Image (cartoon, rainbow, N blue to C red):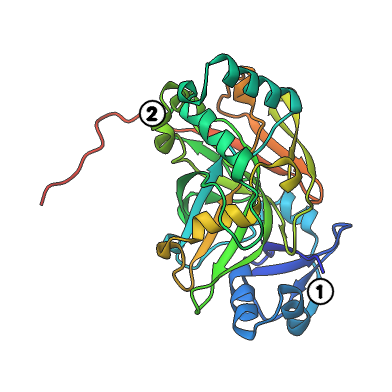
Amino acid sequence: MTLRLIQFVDAHGTRGVAAAEDDGSAKIILGVTTTYELARAAIAAKRSIADQVAQQGLGEGVDIALALSEGRVLAPIDHPDPAHLHLTGTGLTHLGSAEGRDKMHAKAKEAGGEENLTDSMRMFLMGVKGGKPASGTAGAQPEWFYKGNGYALVGPGAELVSPGFAEDGGEEPEMAGIYVIGEDAQPYRIGFALANEFSDHVTEKQNYLWLAHSKLRPASLGVELLTGELPSHVEGTSKIVRGNEVIWEKPFISGEDNMSHTFENLEHHHFKYELFRVPGDVHVHCFGTATASFADGVKTQAGDVFEIDARPFVHPLRNPLKTTEPLAHIAKVVRL
């Protein structure tokens, strides 16, 4: 059974979790105030999320559209201590268009062999060749990056803040896996959410060794946490609104049919590290994209609104871009 979990704050400032239907209607889940609390209860009882919701019971209806309009919808997962939420991702995981793949292979041939390929292209081709192994076996290792902890995660409608030293702030429309680590040190996938894996593409383009710097930015999650399996083919639209004008809009696709890696393989190469199997921790892992406005020459500016919409998610993810002032001095360390 597929459930849509939505975290919100009611008109009195009290947190709650709603279970939503495909038509957008939602009811509060009794006895819990956070998705994290619900997930921990399900893990402890060895139940599915759907069975745990049934055990908890449902209460009164929740007007999610009204809550969104009033800024009362939160990211669909968080942690009581934000330092115990890991925000990470993998790149070069999506095949893109058939034309793009043909061009890439043609370029590889023209380059005169694998020894002349860029590291990025070599990694992409490794994924195409070995990113979908038989279930239960490890395949090609993907590109991996760290974005931050729970302090870097924002919800629907919240600002995506680009620091003053950044050279760009651009969207990346993605699917994100949501995980909670059980007391048995086992990762449990709670579900999937829309994500904007916000990055500094200009910095990354100058030197791929600066990828790590370019990814240390916030990311946003959509309204709903979709439990169960993600459809193998997901279609959506990503756009940027400036004032009353849509300055860029493009379709994007995701899901395993459109990826060079399985989710299982990407999960293996993340959770194989003991560091990421600490009981009680939360993981939000972005799975990559083949679509970004930067590739089309778009330069974003403060006040732009990113909007990502994709089925099977009911609500789009919208976030305005904010930029901070440049540092007036070198980041200072106090010597004791």
In x, y percent, where is residue 72? 66, 56
Q: Is residue 157 left or right of residue 250?
A: left
What residue is shown with label 2? Answer: 165
Quadrant of the rendered structure where residue 34 is?
bottom right
Task: Mark yes or no: residue 42 visible.
Answer: yes
* Residue occupying the point 64% across, 85% down: 45
Please say whether residue 14 is visible from this viewpoint. no
Residue at x-position 45% and y-position 66%: 81
Asked whether 233 or 223 is in front, the reply is 233
**Which numbered tag is attached to residue 60?**
1
Q: Residue at x 43, y 60 (%)?
A: 273
* Residue 18 screen position, x and y as percent: 74, 67
* Residue 330 image offset from top left, x and y in percent: 24, 32
Q: Which mark is residue 259?
A: none
Under mark 2, the amino acid is: Phe
Left or right for 211, reference 298 = left
Q: Position of residue 177 (x, y in %)?
A: 62, 56
Task: Name the element at disc 1.
Answer: strand
Q: Earlier in the sequence, mark 1 or mark 2?
A: 1
Amino acid type, mark 1: Glu
Q: Nearer the viewer, mark 1 or mark 2?
A: 2
Vertical order, 318 against 231 (above or below):
above
Residue at the farthest top position: 110
Q: Nearer the viewer, residue 117 or 258?
A: 117
Crowd class of label 2 (few under 14; some 14 to 19; many from 20; radius 10 Å): few
